[in-house]
Image: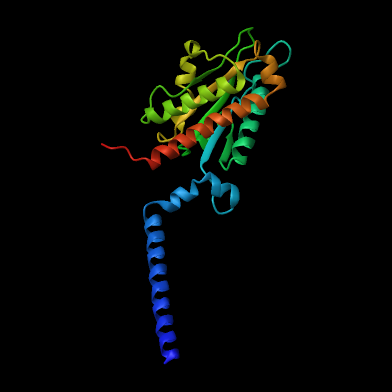
Amino acid sequence: METARLERLHTCLFRLLMMVLVVIGGLIALYFYQGGWDRMQQSRFLARVIPDLFPGPRVAIISGHRGFDSGAMCEDGTMEAAVNEAIAQGVAQRLRKAGVAVILLDEYDPRLEGLRARALVSIHADSCIDQSGFKVAGPEETVIPDQDALLTACLIDAYARGTGLPARPQSITQDMTQYHAFQRVSPQTPGAIIEVGYLGGDHDLLVNHPEIPAEAIAQGVLCFLDAQDRAQKTPTVP
Ligand SMILES: [Zn+2]
């Protein structure tokens, strides 16, 4: 008598457990069906915890002039390409620590052709004159104006706060808005070029403390990735 009741209870519990498992399995399948795997691949958290399985969002950084020429050359021997490189390396290192997969590119890197990435940022420095300030520009022609504007805004905000340098949007040139790499990467890759300061007036910051601009640019990129993730989670009402 007692054993029969116990057996019924066991069968009942077993069925309940199976139902719960089926429901959980269904929810997981639905999550993957709704693009969950892609989201997991882009997760910075998972990339930090299990980097072998989850690459994290991919960002491309161009070390300005690298593999091509020296860029601006100052009388004291300061070379723009070397300044750009120190900052670009710092940006890559910081982003990787934050779970972002970074590809560090030369100025005319063949990998730019059709490149798909969550963002492309090119790092350059301004001339040797005794002026101070930075500027950021996105492509003049683009099919993703909102994304480009968001990347530019994030970089300007983070760079101004991180370095204390003034933004100089009035001195943005066509060399920046028609930058060659903007035309070579995939039209779906948001892009920006930053002139991190003047080799003349901002010499001390750029040459002696490249970690400060590097941290500021990394923060700008992370601001952009976070804003993109938030936008994806909140679907816009038509
Ligand atoms: Zn340059």
- Which quadrant is home to the N terminus? bottom left
Q: Position of residue 51 (x, y in %)?
A: 59, 50
Q: Residue furthest front?
A: 2
Q: Nearer the viewer, residue 7 or 227?
A: 7
Where residue 209 sits, quadrant-wise, is: top right
Residue 74 at x, y percent in the picture: 68, 12
Residue at the spot 46% in from the left edge and 31% down from the top edge: 184
Number of marks in picture: 0
Task: Give the position of the C terminus as an image quadrant.
Answer: top left
**Where is residue 197, by image quadrant?**
top right
- Left or right: residue 39 compared with residue 48: left
Residue extending furthest toward the left: 238
Q: Is residue 238 above or below residue 209?
A: below
Front residue of this view, candidates 128 and 229: 229
Q: Is residue 154 left or right of residue 123?
A: left
Residue 8's place in the image compared with 94, above or below, is below
Q: In x, y percent, where is residue 126?
A: 59, 15
